[in-house]
Image (spheres, coloured by chain):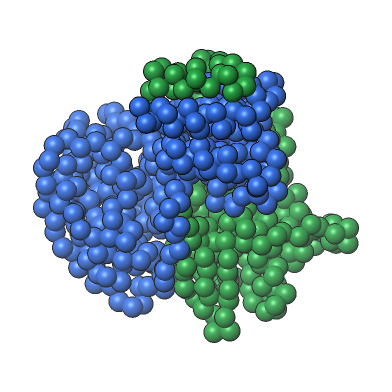
Amino acid sequence: MHFLVFIEQRNGTIKKASLETLSAAAVLAKEPASPVEAVCLGTASGLDTLGAYGASKVYHVPDSRLDLYSSTAAVKAVTAVATEYGADVVFLPATSLGRDLAPLLAVRLDAGYAADVVSLALDEGGITAVRPVFAGKAFERVRIETPRQVYTLRPNVFPALTADNMSCPVVTFDAALSEEDFTARSVGTSIAASKLDVAEATIIVSGGRGMQGPEHWHYIEDLAGVLGAATGASRAAVDAGWRPHAEQVGQTGKTVSPNLYIACGISGAIQHLAGMSSAKVIVAINKDKDAPIFQAADYGIVGDVFEVLPALTDALKRHMGS
Amino acid sequence: MNIFVCISHVPDTTTKIIIGQDGKSIDRTEVTYILNPYDEFAIEAGLQWKESKGGEVTAVCVGSPEVKETIRKAFAMGVDKGIHIVTDSPFDSYGTARALADTLRERRPDVVFCGRQSIDYDGWQVPGMLAELLGMPAVTVVSSLELREDGTFTAERDIEGGKETIVSRLPALISAQKGLNNPRYPKLQGIMAAKKKPIEDVPAVQTPPRVRVLEMFKPPLKSGGRIVGEGAGAVPELVRLLHEEAKVI
């Protein structure tokens, strides 16, 4: 098998989820040794450092029209690289960009596609992948039956491993894109620079109905600030108009896999649990000792969020300081 | 304008998932089905375009005979016509996209709306695959949309930490994210009319599955969950546990 990993850049910076994806492919390729190559579109620097994450070569399409995402052009460019160099398995991070591009690529390559994979294995029958279904209420183990295969890997699940400081060759590839190829193109992004997204964060502090209103969100934000965490919200808090939908964790929001998830005033409806139960460690703070969130949590404090949160913020400030 | 909305028939979000006898699918006996929540935004988008630009809205659904009830929910919101692509055996995402593409191609859609994902298998792939099979651009996870007279449009899609502005042109496929609009509630008149609207049955051509499910299983239950204590007094112990035991801070 010949692996190709899509490296996502935004504003010329390689996204961490791409490094995780590359590392996971490199781990899988060890036995038997399969080539792992990478492809990156648009202006980007430091691509030779991808060697440290397991890439043997990077194909770079430096066309500056690809600096911002264009699905129609990206699918053409990646298909051209995969076809030219005989890659039969393509991995992408399951980011907003990867999830948009992967299905297009699967059709172009006549490949089967497994999305949002959380575990990969290789045996004599080929690759098997585990992926959540029903927002994490269950998992399925799948095998792609077609010779060519596409996988997207969920961010924050696979570690980004640097094996050594090896750099790898970067080969410039001309994808021969014409203006016609940019039928759908990004003309800009608006990203709050200070704001960490729940889908990418390693720590999330999340609030629910128990916060009683948006005016109390400073309790959540203060704790998140101390931990360098993203702020999340339950559906109840979003539907009440307290918080934007982008922060919603759960079945109709985002499914997240942080190292630490702190649920504050969240009762733990099944839809919410589905979205966050794959967090490595879950802390619940709720005044109702019978709230279902305590069943999903590793550690719980029964109490008033307005008393516990400031105490926790202070204690963590001291802890971080020491 | 020839507007199509692809909809799916999915287990209610409150459903407790039980693995079926075969170990590869869910037990469907106690499951209540709903119109996929994201498809409501897609239907609303289609209806709004019809109201401002004219034309008709057709809902398309792939599945067994039960999906007709979901098509009728779309009718109750105001959708004009329904197409039921009939199959008894479940399709994988590619099979679904193929069946939809085979049906839609000759009907020459100006726009195809979908929900960003169906909340059962969470594949996030039917919209993109369908667009690619139809040879039109896909703009996915759209939370704001503006169509111009010349058929070009500007859409905002949700990305990590913000929005991305996409410019494209019709014909196109657009997948809807929550926030795109406020889906209307069916009125009694709409519910009555839904019973009389026609649903066209189209046989599905079976495509060999590209992805085979080997097994389905439930996530392991958390067993170590414990109440550290009550109120602010429990905070020092929690911090100690997070640092020494869980090692996350």
Which residue is more in the foreground, A198 or B57?
A198
* Residue for point 43% across, 64% down: A189
Please state if B221 lies on the left or on the right of A37 as rendered.
right
Residue at horizontal 27 percent and vertical 64 percent from the top: A42
Side of A140 relative to A206 (left or right): left
- Picture mark count: 0
- Visible residue check, residue A225: yes
Q: Is residue A153 above or below residue B102?
A: above
Residue A38 versus residue B172: which sits nearer the camera? A38
Question: Residue A102, how many percent across, how many down?
Answer: 39, 53
Chain A takes which shade in the image? Answer: blue
Instruction: In this rendered view, identify the residue nearer to me: B117 or A126.
Output: B117
Task: Please determine whether, in this image, residue B70 is positioned above or below residue A274.
Answer: below
For image coordinates 54% across by 84% down, the residue present is: B150
In the image, residue A262 sits, relative to residue B164, either above or below, namely above
Q: Residue at horizontal 36%, vertical 77%?
A: A180
Which quarter of the picture shows residue A155?
top left
Please identify the residue farthest to the bottom as the structure is shown: B150
The chain coloured green is: B
Q: From the viewer's perspective, is A31 left or right of B23?
A: left
Q: Is residue B174 above or below residue B246?
A: below
Q: Is residue A79 visible?
A: no
Along the viewing direction, whichever of B106 and A189 lies nearer the viewer = A189
Where is the N terminus of chain A found, in terms of image quarters?
top left
Residue A157: image location, x then y, percent: 38, 35
Q: Position of residue B56 (x, y in %)?
A: 70, 72
Quadrant location of the C terminus of chain A in the rendered image = top left
Residue B220 position within the rendered picture, expressed as x and y whole percent measured from the top left = 50, 21
